[in-house]
Amino acid sequence: MNTFMKKWRNQPFFTYLFLAIQTIVFILGYLTPSIQISGVMYGPFVAYMHEYWRFVTPIFLHFGLAHFAINSVILYYMGQQVEAIYGHSRFFGLYMLSGIMGNAMSFAFNQAGVQSAGASTSLFGLFGAFLILGLHFKNDYRIQAMVRQFALFVGLNLVFGLFDQSIDIWGHIGGIIGGLLLGNLFALPKNYGKYSIHTRIISGVLFVFLLVIFVIYGLKKYQILV
């Protein structure tokens, strides 16, 4: 029994859970399109209808099969690595809060009326959380090699996003900012000594500050706040 429990705890069950949720939501969205409409990030509905759940629900919604498949593959491979390194609870927080940060930045800076959705806000948060490891583990060649690979991938995606109008570049930027800050805040299990307590506190405060600023800026854009 103990062996089974230990093996189960070592599985990336939150990665599998998020994959299962977005798969179920994708199937339901195909059968009932109203689910998609009621869940995507759509600024006017957030500002005027107070549908604040739209900061969360877009994480699990996708536009079309290709969008869903690409994000699912990235989540499957990237999620397992990050969950193994950060631990289950930290991974859950990284994924959800980075996604919320990305959607908040999308709400703030996208043109009025733009609809956006996708796990990429959270995925870029995972990239950010992985990249920040490079600052704390400079002498670990394995981490440094992986950080360089992911940095190249992130850089190319951000560049492509500048030229492809179908990509929510603001959501990606917000997600990676969230991941960088949360990676500092959460730190790694049993490695607190490598993370300055002052850096962790500042990162947490900055995360909350930026999240609030993005929401306020978005509301001002829709003239809810003056």
Image (tube, rainbow, N blue to C red):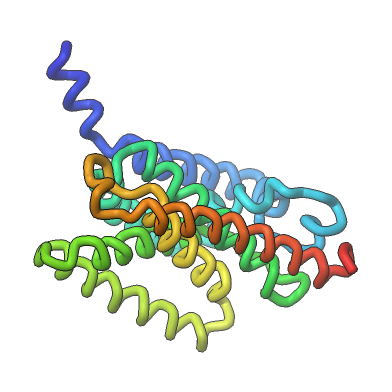
Q: Is residue 205 left or right of residue 3?
A: right
Q: Classify the position of the C terminus by image quarter.
A: bottom right
For this orientation, the residue located farthest to the front is 198
Tell which of 14 and 144 is nearer to you.
144
Image quarter of residue 41 = bottom right
Query: Residue 192, image x and y in percent?
Result: 28, 46
- Residue at the spot 53% in from the left edge and 61% down from the top edge: 64
Image quarter of residue 167 = bottom right
- Residue at the spot 49% in from the left edge and 60% down from the top edge: 178
Vertical order, 222 against 100 (above or below) = below
Query: Residue 157, image x and y in percent?
Result: 40, 77
Q: Is residue 182 left or right of residue 84?
A: right
Query: Residue 97, image x and y in percent?
Result: 52, 50
Residue 65 visible, this angle: no
Query: Residue 195, image x and y in percent?
Result: 30, 54
Tell which of 142 and 187 is nearer to you.
187
